[in-house]
Amino acid sequence: MKLLLPKIFKESAANSTKQKGILGMELVRLGLERGKTAREALDVITKLIEEYGQWGSAVVGEEKPYNNSFIIADSTEAWVLETMDHHWVAKRIQDKFHSISNEMSIRDEWDLTSNGFVEKAVRSGWIGRDEEFDAAFAYTDFTNSLQVSHIRVQRTKQLLNDTLAANQPVDANWMKRILRDHYEDTFLEGPYFNAALPDFQTICMHSSPANFTWGITASSTIFELPEDKWHFPLIWWSPVTPCTGLYLPIFMCEQEFPEFLSNAGTVRVKTVDPSKSVDDESTEDSYWWMFRDLLDELKGNENGTLFNKNKEMARKSFDRLERKWMTLIRDIEDEAALLNKAGKRKRHRFSYGLFK
């Protein structure tokens, strides 16, 4: 899921009596809960958007609409869904690989739309009635800079195309490579000093003393869809910045996750008005905060004086552990699939002892 900033934001924000809608992350949850397939999840999300619209903010305390873009996939098909308030447009992905960022990507070809999608843009004067309709052009608010979105999405496309041209596999390992990217092998050669002191937006995002990066990457996840109904979905999750993180393999089944993985820091209230929540702080029993504190240790100070040297040492250990897990996990998932097929689901509980 990605945040979009289309023109309809301005119209919605100006209407102070407008009913607030659903947060994008909640749309993801509802789609997963209520849809058994990618198409069913698409239908769930779009019906909710049409009825309730969207609301929220990328910044705690801000009150304004919050539009979203999604890639929705199962083992047989995938869709791109881009949304604008109560309107939406969707396109079925025909290629094996696709990438989106914080901007509209669907232009003059799509498979499904909300009723009145084209008419809304024409009626609002965002595109001429006689012009060839370009959805991204019509709905994009050009007073919001596209540099944060367009450069990043073009970089992911470049990395994917280079991989395909070299006949290399686009697998979980390669996805980690993309998520950890700072444009190192481009003409930019990565941030001039180091990634912890960025001078432009990169895929793996670090906070800048100039405050133009909106903070750091909070976490990242790689999803592996099951090859059949007996195998379990697998995710690789890394808290905080991917370049300093460790991707932990987690099966999606009946297991209960250790509290250490899901604990926040000092704020343990599960439901609270974000505008009234106090700032979360580090605790020793939070997996996320363990890696957030590690990032500060690796940087050494605000300007990242020790970052390059320390990150190299951390990556040496983390890469070795990730390679070990990648080998072991394949045997584990095959064994689990055999037990599942034999109706012995309760006999296997995926132990996190492997990952300690």
Image (cartoon, helix red, strand yellow):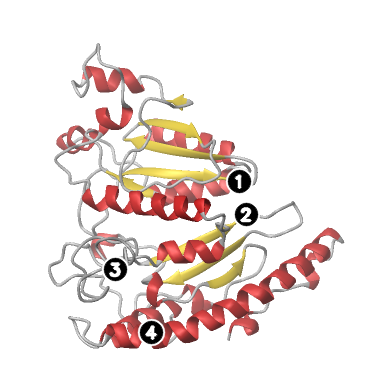
Can you give x and y, in whole percent of width and height, for residue 324 in the image? 61, 80
Choose top left, top right, bottom left or bottom right for residue 194.
bottom left
| Mark 2 neighbour class, 10 Å CA radius: few under 14, some 14 to 19, many 20 or more | some
| 188 lies above or below 87 | below
Q: Residue at x 45, y 79 (%)?
A: 287
**Considering only order in the chain, which callout, 1 or 2, is on the residue closer to the N terminus?**
1
| Mark 4 neighbour class, 10 Å CA radius: few under 14, some 14 to 19, many 20 or more | some
Choose top left, top right, bottom left or bottom right for residue 242.
bottom left
**Considering only order in the chain, which callout, 1 or 3, is on the residue closer to the N terminus?**
1
Q: For the residue marked with disc 1, what is the amino acid?
A: Asp
Marks 4 and 3 in Cβ contact (< 8 Å): no
Q: Secondary structure beneath disc 4?
A: helix
User: Marks 4 and 1: which is nearer the front?
Assistant: 4
Q: Secondary structure beneath disc 1?
A: loop
Marks 2 and 3 in Cβ contact (< 8 Å): no
Q: Which residue, given by chain and number where applicable, does mark 3 sit on?
A: 216
Can you give x and y, in whole percent of width and height, for residue 92 in the image? 52, 34
Q: Which residue, given by chain and number where applicable, does mark 2 sit on?
A: 225
Foreground residue among 80 and 323 = 323
**Considering only order in the chain, which callout, 3 or 4, is on the residue closer to the N terminus?**
3
Marks 2 and 1 in Cβ contact (< 8 Å): yes
| 342 lies above or below 134 | below
Q: Which residue, given by chain and number where applicable, does mark 1 sit on?
A: 74
